[in-house]
Image (spheres, rainbow, N blue to C red):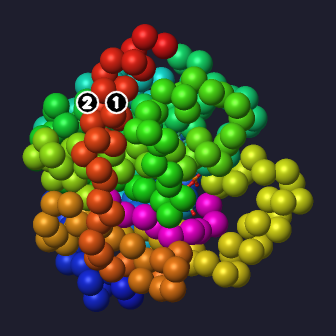
Amino acid sequence: MKSERYLRKHVNSQEGKHFLVTGSSSGIGLEAARSLLFLGASVTFMVRNREKTKGRINAIEKEFGHPVDAKIVTYDQADPDSIIACINALEEKRFDGIVLSAGIYFPKKGSLGKQGVPITLQVNAIGVQTGFDAFYKRYPDAKYIFINSVANKPPKNNDYTPYFRAAKGKRFEDYCISKRIVMDIYALALKKGASAYMTHPGVTKTNIIQNYAPLIKRLGNGFLYIFVHHAWKAALGIVDLCCNDHEAGTYMVPRGPFHISGYPKAEEAPRVPEEEMDAWEAFYLQDYLTF
Ligand SMILES: NC(=O)c1ccc[n+]([C@@H]2O[C@H](COP(=O)([O-])OP(=O)(O)OC[C@H]3O[C@@H](n4cnc5c(N)ncnc54)[C@H](OP(=O)(O)O)[C@@H]3O)[C@@H](O)[C@H]2O)c1
């Protein structure tokens, strides 16, 4: 396994520990789950596609040459009812860490969530907030790992409403706003006393650009393959936060130039202004419900 050398040097065995990773059917979530399994932990894969994930776990077992302690639960992060039902049905009494990795970047144009909001905001913002709230109620002692992005943008005048109402097909803006909201959720979680952590994985080739036009997708994937790190390395910040002792609030980023590539290092977390996180909380608790 590609992360083996790093893991042997930087992380102890995780036997007896149990982690849950959302979006672990592909990309960064899958690579984080693979490393956690390699370290001997049990991993719950919280995904929307059971068959695809079964295939991934079979491949991991083949690679390791032995069975792994993995379980699959399914949900749809675009549907708040499905998120809550899945979390409430979990049989585990405790998790050591919960990684909120599922997310989308560039959906089909015009895709909307249940309440008619742009799908990226539905999955990456509403979905993460709904998931965190339901998890935290059941597992207040777990570590929570949030994934943000170098591409994040604070809302104009601390007002999130226009972005949720707009549905103008500005997919990159929707993504930047959704990742900023993840930072608000992380900051609010810390304020509540949760063991919250955040990492941005830099930039890496995953399925994240699957809806680009075919030629752009080919060029984009080629560019990412050559110039930035691979998903197994991008996932190491998550693994480090899950497994090593860090103060709540620790922020992990890739250590290379421009923070887009490299092994993880801890850095001071970006400050999220109180007014902004309060604006998100108010929007989520009041305005969003009236959509
Ligand atoms: N790649 C990068 O350069 C980069 C940079 C910064 C941040 N990130 C963040 O890293 C996280 C993982 O992304 P990735 O790059 O690994 O992309 P990815 O390969 O596309 O993985 C995304 C994961 O999210 C799942 N997902 C999407 N919509 C879902 C839904 N409605 N319900 C449940 N699961 C859903 C996908 O499930 P399926 O397998 O079923 O599609 C997949 O497992 C995201 O939060 C992303 O914003 C990525």
> Is residue 82 rendered magenta in the image?
no
Q: Residue furthest top?
A: 290
What residue is drawn where x is 57% and y is 38%?
120
Which of the labelled discs sits on residue 35, or is there none? none
Rendering coords of residue 100 (x, y %): 37, 48
Q: Is ligand 1 less than 8 Å from the beta carbon at label 1? A: no
Residue type for callout 1: Thr
Please provide the residue range marked out in magenta.
198-206
Horizontally, residue 6 falls left or right of residue 164, namely: left
What residue is drawn where x is 85% and y is 51%?
213
Rendering coords of residue 232 (x, y %): 49, 72
Q: Mark 2 points at which residue?
A: 134
Depth check: give the residue in front, 240 or 183: 183
Q: Is residue 181 depicted above or below 219 in this figure?
A: above
Q: Mark 1 points at which residue?
A: 130
> Which type of secondary structure does the marked residue at label 2 adopt?
helix
Rendering coords of residue 170 (x, y %): 69, 40
Residue type for callout 2: Ala
> Is residue 204 rendered magenta in the image?
yes
* CB within 8 Å, label 1 to label 2: yes
Depth check: give the residue in front, 198 or 5: 198
